[in-house]
Image (spheres, grey):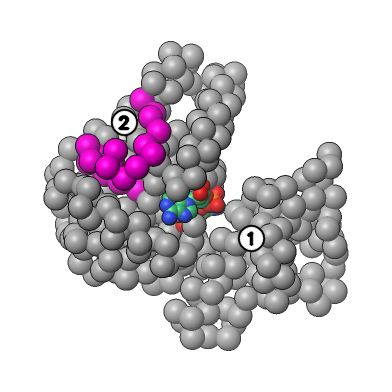
């Protein structure tokens, strides 16, 4: 098995900052990169805030927090990622954008470095084909929020080697996470089940069966879900939910995965949920107000 000590994270959004947080706390040196350098600064602030909360709740010690923060550095160009043993890509859920990142990384990474994608739905085999190392390519699907959620889906592409898989399993276990193995089919396990349910909740709203509040309350209290599906959609990001539905619709060629036109409309408006302050709820008010 390869030894991992330095981890690169590309994409410093809500998932990228969580993955960087977990890796640094797990004792790895982390290089955090984003196309927009301002996102790296924001991610570092978020990580500091979230680590502070963990200290206050006594789940980690102040010394753990200080050491973790020292291990995370920003990387403003791909060349900075040269020392990485593992790079985890976590940029927007768009096939072309991800494939371009992997192509751009080719001249930078060491030949033995492992490359992983945190994609929620896109074929690992297809993404691997954009790299120079399909045997060292794997899907590591962290859940949101990464520091809190207990499981990571591991997805092997057609060409992923046993050594890459074994190294990845050891790495994820070293972070204190459980593993769910998933085959490389659209949206894997969690999102294959979860996101069509969210899409159905948006249809329920679209068809006037219930209001935003009624749908969320019904599912929280009637199905004992910790969050209502529309609240959860805002948490995930409506652009990510739509991308996952599109991958399911195209990848499985089944009309039951048709994205709800209302979900498309919210994304067209740029109302992407919590990250843009507005989605099915408006987060600029306290408490958040339903937008329909
Ligand atoms: N949101 C979730 O609940 C969730 C859960 C698990 C996995 N994921 C997956 O994680 C990935 C990231 O999702 P997110 O919710 O963090 O999105 P996000 O919108 O919060 O962050 C995406 C980040 O990628 C950056 N970016 C965009 N294009 C880039 C490029 N070419 N190079 C470098 N950086 C680039 C953006 O500036 C942004 O900071 C997606 O593949 C998504 O499917 C999301």
**Count of all numbered marks drawn on residues in the image:** 2
Q: Is residue 112 left or right of residue 48?
A: left
At x 54% / y 74%, what residue is drawn? 246
**Residue 233 visible in rendering:** no
Residue 173: name its quadrant. Answer: top left
Q: Which residue does the numbered mark 2 point to in the structure image?
A: 28
Q: Is residue 253 left or right of residue 126?
A: right
Q: Nearer the viewer, residue 237 or 223?
A: 237
Q: Nearer the viewer, residue 233 or 228?
A: 233
Residue 67 percent coordinates (x, y)? 39, 18
Q: Give the crowd class for mark 1: few <14, some 14-19, many >=20 residues within 10 Å.
A: many
- Residue 77 part of the magenta segment: yes
Q: CA–CA distance between discs 1 and 2?
A: 31 Å
Residue 145: name its quadrant. Answer: top right
Q: Which residue does the numbered mark 1 point to in the structure image?
A: 238
Quadrant containing the N terminus in the rendered view:
top left
Residue 284: name its quadrant. Answer: top right
* Boundaries of the magenta span: 71-88
Of mark 1 and mark 2, the one earlier in the sequence is: 2
At x 45% / y 48%, what residue is drawn? 35
Residue 63 percent coordinates (x, y)? 43, 13
Determine contact: label 1, label 2, CB under 8 Å: no
Quadrant containing the C terminus in the rendered view:
bottom right
- Residue 231 part of the magenta segment: no
At x 31% / y 31%, what residue is drawn? 28
């Amino acid at each position: 098995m390869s030894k991992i000590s330095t981890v690169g994270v590309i994409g410093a959004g809500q998932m990228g900052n969580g993955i960087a947080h977990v890796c640094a706390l797990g004792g790895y040196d982390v290089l955090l990169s984003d196309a927009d350098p301002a996102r790296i600064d924001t991610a570092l602030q978020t990580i500091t805030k979230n680590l502070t909360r963990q200290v206050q709740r006594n789940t980690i010690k102040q010394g753990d927090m200080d050491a973790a923060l020292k291990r995370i550095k920003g990387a403003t160009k791909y060349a900075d990622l040269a020392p990485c043993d593992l790079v985890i890509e976590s940029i927007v859920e768009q096939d072309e954008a991800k494939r371009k990142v992997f192509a751009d990384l080719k001249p930078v990474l060491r030949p033995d470095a492992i490359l992983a994608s945190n994609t929620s739905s896109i074929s690992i085999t297809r993404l691997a084909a954009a790299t120079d190392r399909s045997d060292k390519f794997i899907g590591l699907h962290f859940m949101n929020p990464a520091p809190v959620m207990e499981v990571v889906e591991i997805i092997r592409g057609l060409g992923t080697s046993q050594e890459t898989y074994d190294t990845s399993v050891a790495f994820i276990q070293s972070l204190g996470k459980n593993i769910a193995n998933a085959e490389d089919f659209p949206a894997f396990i969690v999102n294959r089940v979860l996101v069509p349910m969210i899409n159905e909740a948006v249809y329920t709203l679209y068809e006037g069966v219930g209001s935003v509040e009624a749908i969320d309350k019904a599912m929280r209290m009637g199905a004992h879900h910790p969050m209502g599906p529309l609240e959860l959609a805002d948490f995930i990001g409506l652009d990510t939910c739509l991308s996952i539905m599109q991958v399911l619709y195209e990848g499985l060629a089944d009309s039951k995965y048709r994205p709800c036109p209302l979900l498309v409309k919210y994304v067209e408006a740029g109302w992407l949920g919590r990250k843009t302050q507005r989605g099915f709820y408006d987060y600029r008010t306290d408490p958040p107000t339903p937008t329909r």
